[in-house]
Image (cartoon, helix red, strand yellow):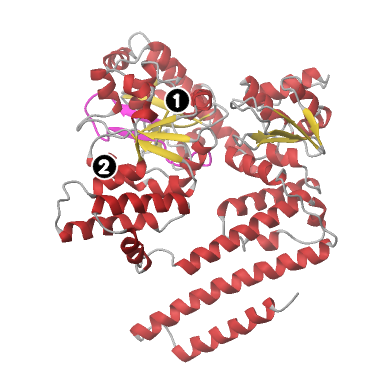
Amino acid sequence: MAPFIPEAKLLEIKDAASIADVIGQYIRLNQRGRYLVGLCPFHAEKTPSFTVYPERNIFHCFGCGAGGNVFTFLMQHLRLTFPEAVAELAQKYGIPLQWKKEISPAQGQLSRQRQTFYEVNELAAKFFESKLAHLQQGESARQYLARRGLPESVAKAYRVGYAPDDWRLLVRALSDQRGNLEAALQLGLIAERTSGGHYDRFRGRVMFPIFDMQGRVIAFGGRVIGEGEPKYLNSPESQLYSKGRNLYGLYQAREAIRKQNIVILVEGYMDLLALRARGVEPVVATLGTALTREQVRLLKGYTSRVMLVFDADTAGLKAMQRSLPHFAGERLSARVLVLPAGEDPDSYAAKYGVEVFTSPWEQGQPLFAFILDQATLGLGDALEAKLAAFESLKPYFQGEVDSVERNLWLQMAAKRLGVPESALEASLKTYRQAALPTIVVRQQEEALNLEKRFIKLLLTYPEVLARFDLEEYLDQFVHPEMQTIAQYIHSCYQQVGYLDHSLLIMQIEEENICRRICSLALAAEEYQLENLESELADYTRSFQKIQLKREHQNLKEKMEHSYKTGKGGDYLALQAQLQDLRQRLKKLESTH
């Protein structure tokens, strides 16, 4: 279990360790006004974009997006764990450091439970590793891995283990080591017997630990090696683990991904390990679910290029098609490497080698081009077929797509279908998807821009937090990421009575949130305020206006439904409510 470090001790070390001095030992920094700039150590560049802000004890690279405080810099640059980075600085600045084995009650029930979960998962991982290495108990699993071409070195790098086909081995091992069985139950490692007691949930399976970005075990996947169902059994979601927010192998591959500026995304544990066993390093895998926006955003923090290599079956092809809106929305380039029918990365590598995976970008197909190919497969000249093909493409044009990219897609579709671009554009304008109408999209964009400016105000002038209650604003945020940042800011302020940027970053586990905070805090355009009270009043009105606009749109939709169906309430009463909303909105907009 990673040792617990009291927050007061972290603040003491952070205050003693000048971020400019620490980073200056590794990078040549030059003064630029209030900032220090230099060449980023995390990506190749010729023009300095790596920025250190000593006043706030944070850094941010405007090129690759890396950001954090003095601890995270050492973790990323020297490949240290968090405790190792803390110990390194404590030793350097002569600060005594005593590790605590358990979290004190003052840290709260949630923190204690999370730490217990980490401890139990680590005990389980070591148990599974020991059983794989056991001469008799692990023999069948070792033979299975050998048949799949997985060398011992790769298995150890990913801490692959084995859960023997026994009902109580893990339960006994956890009990012997005083592991928390209630935590193991919540983590899905064990299950309750109807007659009382517990039994092992994973049995007769090769075990694949899933790690967070600090190298801590947060979940497991188990693959049966004999007869039995399900083929794969996975940990349930918990305080530590969400399958839509994590990726298998990212912790081990992160440096290779940064160095090569590409990630190969596959579907399964063995697909990843098969490529890794043959020397392909920048590989990660999804976790038994469709690719999510959060996972794409996670990858965006490490690379600007994603190569999708899913199974060449119907499910795999559809999964790649469904991922386009996520990549388009995050402005992240994605290509597809289509394998022969019936193949997956594991079987393909075993038959043909991995040459195609060593330089996949050049051999891949842009994601929209792949989708266009699938939509127009065997198209012919039939009018109905062309109409159906474009109908299937329309949803892809409705999301958060860059205007230039969207026009390029339209050109490709027009050329393939033999139809003028203007005709396709006209068809898209009349397209009514069951998703968000354009006005709602505009309202969301307006809200996001407001929330970004508001967060930047808080980060630039944290003294405003003493003049109003941020908690009253939290429910008014529309954009989840901005709301999360606001919640962290509020929590940090409530905890210490002021906003400490470095402490704020220290309390956040999501790397993408840390990077966004650093980016907003070090944005090029600084606020120049003469009257903070007036600025806060303007934001209050702006939040109120956006809320009223959302209510206005919802009421209009309710009226339209009521008018068409004769249901949903008194139409005249709804009209009166709408008029009242318009008056309130008009009054707000006329207020300066």
Picture coordinates of residue 347 (x, y %)? 25, 24
For the point 81% across and 55% down, which residue is it? 528
Q: Is residue 27 left or right of residue 81?
A: right
**What are the residue bounds of the magenta stretch?**
221-243
Give the image location of residue 451, x and y in percent: 64, 58
Q: Mark 2 points at which residue?
A: 315
Q: Which residue is more in the foreground, 6 or 355? A: 355
Kindly state the secondary structure of the residue where label 2 is placed: helix
Q: Pointer 1: what residue?
A: 282
- Mark 1 or 2, nearer chain start: 1
Q: Nearer the viewer, mark 1 or mark 2?
A: 1
Q: In which quarter of the image is residue 229?
A: top left
Above-or-below relation of 130 to 592: above
Instruction: Give the Cα separation between the discs numbered 1 and 2.
Output: 24 Å
Pick out the residue farthest to the right.
530
Task: Specify the amino acid type for callout 2.
Answer: Ala
Q: Specify whether 325 is left or right of 511.
A: left
Name the disc covering residue 208, or none.
none
Q: Can residue 187 be seen in this view?
A: yes
Q: Is residue 198 magenta?
A: no
Q: In which quarter of the image is the N terminus?
A: top right
